Amino acid sequence: MASVELRDVRKAYGALEVIHGVSLSIADGEFIALVGPSGCGKSTLLRMIAGLEDISHGEVAIGGTVVNALTPRERNIAMVFQSYALYPHMTVAENMGFNLKLSGVPKPEIRTRVAEAARMLALEELLERKPSQLSGGQRQRVAMGRAIVRDPAVFLFDEPLSNLDAKLRVAMRTEIKTLHQKVATTSVYVTHDQIEAMTLADRIVVLNGGRIEQVGTPLDLYRMPANLFVAGFIGSPAMNFLEAEVDGADGQPAARLSDGTLVHLDGSRKVRRGQQVQLGIRPEHLLAGQTGDTVLEGDTVVVEPTGAQTHIVFTLAGKPVTAVVDGAFPARHGTPFRASIAAPQVHVFDRASGLSL
Amino acid sequence: MKPATRLYLYLSLSLVACLVLVPLVTTALGGFKSLGDLRVNPFGLPEQWVWSNYTDILFGERYWRQMGNSLLIASVTVFLTVVVSAMAAFTFAHVKFFGAAQLMNYFLIGLMFPVATAILPLFIRIRDLGLLDSYWGVILPQVAFGLGMSILLFRNYFRNLPDELFQAAFVDGCGYIRFFWHVSLPLSRPIVATVSIVSFVNSWNSYILPLIMLNTETKYPWPLGIMVYRGEFGTEWQLVLAFITLTILPTVIVFFLAQKHIIAGLTAGAVKS
């Protein structure tokens, strides 16, 4: 187990820089998720920690030692790949014990450690099978077994659940979390799925275009997104954004939408009259039919029942706005929809810089 | 399938099968005939089954010695071809280095030249190396001429192995050599079989190289052995045919044993597995 430290890490392919100076401290035993859209550099960053990609500039330290020049094996890391990357010609036990065999661990010890890992992951029955005889979830467990057998300093996960179907993904998510609670090894987990990141990680790193947008606990990111990008990325369904102009009324800040609707803002927002802003409203904070600080109204365009909840899309100031209401709410296409929102739950972002105000 | 399609398939496949089988059967049957019978009745069944054509060859020393020579030359050729081309192809598939593409093309150019075109310079080189009239004088040129095709087949196969497999092995502590040995090679059984069979058959049937390089009759492989039945004034065709039948038998058997692998290897990479 070890801490991981990234200091101004950059990656360039020729003249094209894809990671622009990332600095990050990961504490010993912490579970960190790297999230971001495709091409944001999260996998590249992970592979740089792993030693599969050269580091163009900056330093990566594992357990206090700078590892830039070390091979993946010398860094003592274990990696779980999206496609599992099991060796097709080896049995499950051989797959799990391969790295121990390469490092010259005596056979009886390999057997003990493989058996131990297999017990932890409920793979005991499958040890003599080949990967082709396993289901997707079982293969993923073997890939994780291969990682824990060697007792590495850091676990690296590269979108490990993307190849699984939705139900299995949820089950495996729980397994990864349980596993981490058991072995408490420092873990870095790359995913594009923000739900996975929210549920698993101690802290989330949101990446965009090779830069860190924000680092924080899942709830911090949800409650206090630093900018428009994080606000739009974290949360499902995604946050609604509305263009507005700040217009103070009765000493309390407010913002006026293009159709004239006045939205009350929290007093702590650092806004000035006339400022062009972007309002962020989470669909789950819109309360149907009730009266709050601000009441918003529009025609229902789309109704999407999901069972427990219903997603309603209505038009406000010419833009579609999504609200999440109780599944029992009587919503119909074409009817007017009325929802309210409390002032503290309206996020305000500067339109020019995108930063939270 | 429509009956017309089925009929067409059966007819065309039968025709192709005939093209392959008629010469083989004619050869095998011809070995049972007397020379006169062969002259007047080349394709039919023998008038009188002359078993001695076959038994004389089988119980003679020369046949076994020449088969042994052929086997030795072919086995060493196969071994060297597989080892050298697999390692070269692995390098081309996984290691980026300056001039890799040029070097690869250089190997592939070798595909354009049959041995016969280079026979004179080859002879001079082998003579200068002092390998004339030795097995190595035949084996080394055969390996060299087999490399182009073998590297091509191996490289395409290695390239199609998933990248993540290599990365996983790298994280597990493999370098290039261990990855080659522990992962690439065990996964390449079909392509190893294909390359082995192709180079074995080429070596087994090779005529011109041994003819030029070997002088001692005890070192002759079987294709040179046929020359014994050619006299100054006539050829004993029935013995030639019997001899050929007995010598191609092993390759036919090997092909049937390995045909699954050969076909899998040739089409590997053409479709996603």
Image: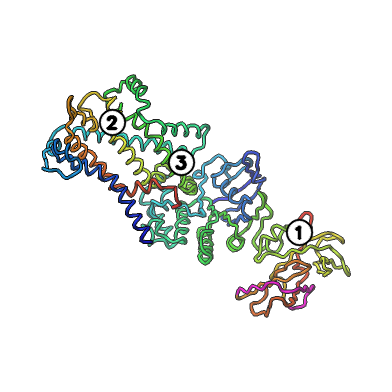
Q: Which mark is residue A27?
A: none
Coloring applied to the structure? rainbow
The extreme front residue here reads: B40
What secondary structure characterizes most of the magenta part?
A: strand
Task: Say if A15 sits above or below A253 in the image.
Answer: above
The kind of secondary structure element at disc 3 is: loop
| Chain letter belonging to callout 3 | B
Dot 3 and dot 1 residues touching (CB under 8 Å): no
**Mark 2 is on which residue type?**
Tyr
The magenta region covers A289-306
| Chain letter belonging to callout 1 | A
Residue toward you, A48 or B134? B134
Q: Which mark is residue B207?
A: 2
| Residue A116 visible to an observer of this rendering | yes
Residue for badge 3:
B175
Question: Where does the image place residue B139, in percent across and percent down from the top left?
Answer: 31, 30
Q: Is residue A303 magenta?
A: yes
Q: Is residue B214 left or right of residue B82?
A: left
